[in-house]
Amino acid sequence: MSSTIQGKTVRPGGLRYSYYATGVNKKPQAKAKAPKKKSHFKGVLLALILIAAAFVIYPSVSAKTSSLPPSPKNATTQASSPKVVNQAPAVAAAPSICTTNQLSKQIFVSISKQHLWVCNGTTQVFDSAVVTGDEQHADTLTPPGTYHIYAMATNRTLTGSDENGSWNDFVNYWMPFLYNQYGAYGFHDATWRSPSAFGHVDINTANASNGCVELPLASAKWIYNWVNVGTTVTIQN
């Protein structure tokens, strides 16, 4: 860029020599310059300096910008389409065994699942892992069928014998529901077993019960406080 001062063309870089641009080798007298002209000259000088500076600065900024690393490939697509982590499909919960119950109180026992469910009408109010009888002998297995609790007692000692030997066991809660040629069958606690054993004992070994439905102590207590004589019990394979 250039400018004209006193009829001479001057480059921005040569503004400091503008006093000699008239071709006269002597600097003009200061008194010959009116204050307004001096002020005008300074304004023109400042404007030209700013214009020259702009040419120096802006190309430099442009060069820094162009040297920036390129944007990642498909950056826009990645931002608008986040990666979705595969998730297992939701599995609907199995319906409660109590949904088909038509009695006010009923207990269902599953031999294959080693578990029982307590139903108050169609509402499940309790469940627990259990241990049922040894399936190897007729007198040690827990007989499938529908029965009713016919007695309730606490702090009893159960005695008897079968194919696997004899027993003499103290129980805190006793709720018999069947009596046949082999003896009495019922719900009771089995404090001689570890808590982790319930639901995991192999029913095809002598380690299973002698035919009763054995419960953890807390479960036996809960059921004892909920049932009454006459409550229906259904044993299923």
Image (cartoon, helix red, strand yellow):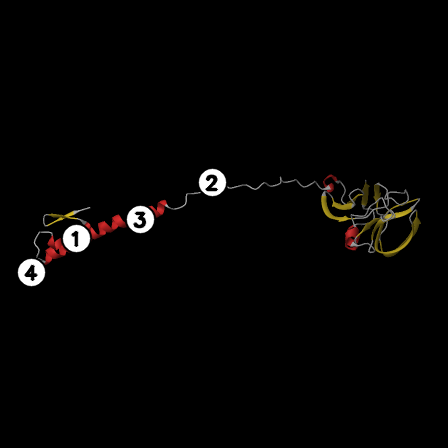
Q: Residue furthest front?
A: 25
Q: What distance separates the C-alpha of mark 2 from that of mark 1? A: 55 Å
Query: Position of 41 compared to 164: left or right?
Result: left
The residue carrying mark 3 is 60
Relative to 77, residue 11 above or below: below
Q: Amino acid at mark 3?
A: Ser
Image position, residue 195 (x, y; %): 78, 54
Looking at marks 3 and 4 on the same chain, the residue that comes earlier in the sequence is marked by 4
Disc 4 or disc 1, which is closer to the eye? 1
The quarter in which the C terminus is drawn is top right
3D distance between C-alphas at marks 4 and 1: 21 Å
Mark closest to the chain's N terminus, 1 or 3: 1
- The CA span between labels 3 and 2 is 34 Å
Q: Which residue is mark 1?
A: 15
Amino acid under disc 2 = Ser
Q: The disc labelled 4 sits on which kind of residue?
A: Lys
Mark toward the start of the polypeptide (4 vs 1)? 1
Q: Position of residue 180 (x, y in %)?
A: 91, 44
Please name the residue that numbered disc 4 is placed on: 31
**Circles 4 and 1 in contact, beta carbons < 8 Å:** no
Foreground of the two, 20 or 7:
20
Is there a contact, CB below 8 Å, between mark 2 and mark 4?
no
